[in-house]
Image (tube, helix red, strand yellow):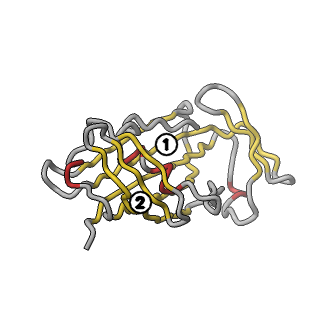
Amino acid sequence: MKMLLMIKACVLMAAAPYLVADSSIQKVAYPVGAAATITTEATVESVNKDKREVTLKKSDGSTTTIKVPEAVRNLDQVKSGDTVKAKYTEAIALNIRKSDEAPSAVESQTIERAPAGATPKGEIRSTVQITANVEKIDKSKREVTLLKPDGSKTDVKVPEDVKNFDNLKKGDQVVVTATESLALEVVPKQ
């Protein structure tokens, strides 16, 4: 599943990898209907408004300089000593439904940014919903073969804690909804 985030060029999105890039943070394989949130922050070390660059210092003491795209509003308000807070959330939900529709994939994205003159902040959210048809069920192994939207098939092991596995039938449709969001804000130095 490839989630394209068109606005990652924005400083709020460009800063994200530097803020949440921590060796203790890994992508997690979630059970059905779960969510996880990571929060972190960095301190603004310096701002070069002419080059549109901000140097951030993370909690481990390392620093990184990011290029701030023109799309980012209110860079002139960012000062040395300000704090950049990041909140990254992943959520996934799984649903089974009766359907005779073809498998599909739909993606949507929303972007919010601070109005001109306000404290810099923003959020980007991407949601992908993919449906796959159940082609084959091996109840003894708790495995299903799914027909994906691209026409390929994949075998999936169904965890023991998934309820109603015994009610699953060939032709049912598995609907997976995955959402990622990243919110960033600059908090002025007190």
Q: Identify which amino acid the numbered label 1 is placed on.
A: Gln
- Residue 20 horizontal/vertical position (percent): 51, 56
Q: Report the residue that reaches farthest toward the left.
A: 117
| Contact check, label 2 and label 1, Cβ < 8 Å | no
Q: Which residue occupies 36% across, 48% down?
A: 54
- Residue 21 horizontal/vertical position (percent): 56, 54
Q: Report the residue that reaches farthest toward the top.
A: 151
Question: Which residue is disc 1 drawn over?
Answer: 129
Q: Is residue 85 above or below residue 52?
A: below
Q: Identify which amino acid the numbered label 2 is placed on.
A: Ala
Q: Quadrant of the C terminus?
A: bottom left
Is residue 146 at all visible to an observer of this figure?
yes
Q: Quadrant of residue 134?
A: top right
Is residue 179 at all visible to an observer of this figure?
no
Callout 1 crowding tier (Cα within 10 Å): few <14, some 14–19, many ≥20? some
Answer with mark 2 or mark 1, whichever residue precedes in sequence. 2
Q: Which residue occupies 62% across, 43% down?
A: 172
Secondary structure of the residue carrying tag 1 is: strand
Q: CA distance from mark 2 to mark 1?
A: 25 Å
Foreground residue among 43 and 180: 43
- Residue 94 horizontal/vertical position (percent): 57, 54
Secondary structure of the residue carrying tag 2 is: strand
